[in-house]
Image (tube, rainbow, N blue to C red):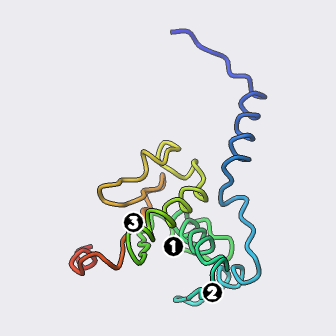
Amino acid sequence: MVKREVDPFAFLAEKLIMTAGRPNISSYKAHPKQLEFHSALEKLKLYIGGNRSGKTTGGVCEDIWWATGKHPYRRTPTPPVKGRVIGVDFTNGIAKIILPEIARWTPLSELINGSWEDSYNKEFRTLTFANGSFIEFMSYDQDLDKFAGT
């Protein structure tokens, strides 16, 4: 087996290019309403707003912080954390909107083997993080029994 030396500058350049093309939660800048939502210490909170008001992005970032145990504004349970994200329907709400946003904002370093493919189970609609936390993706069009079992 031939050992190949890695040029540290080429490695750094590759990572910088990847980060520029795939920003993640470390580059997230909350606007004032999102910041109010994130920093609220209430046990239950609701983010209501019109189109393009940042609800999806704010909610997704909140989910990632809880799953990773790295919330910048409040104390969260020590991972692993079990969570659920529920949309109106799976095809249009979860698959087309929520999952791409979760994939966009989740750092690869937080995923199993640094890979979305290794972390997301399509059959069970579950994203498992490297720290053991997981998020189940469900929809209101599922049978009630699917919600009760877990």
Task: Evaluate whether residue 96 shows in this view.
Answer: yes
Residue type indicated by callout 2: Gly
> In this rendering, is residue 5 above or below 87?
above
Task: Evaluate whether residue 136 shows in this view.
Answer: no
Residue 68, percent from left and from top: 54, 62
Q: Residue 91 carries which label?
A: 3
Check disc 3: other Cα within 10 Å, few if <14, some if 14-19, many if 20+.
few
Which numbered disc, 2 or 3, marks the residue that appears first in the sequence?
2
Q: Which of marks 1 and 2 is in front?
A: 2
Q: Which of marks 2 and 3 is in front?
A: 3
> In this rendering, is residue 32 above or below 98?
below
Q: Residue 77 carries which label?
A: 1
What SS does tag 2 mark? loop
Residue 89, percent from left and from top: 38, 73
Residue type indicated by callout 1: Pro
Q: Which of marks 3 and 1 is in front?
A: 3
- Residue at 58% across / 90% down in the picture? 42
Which numbered disc, 3 or 1, marks the residue that appears first in the sequence?
1
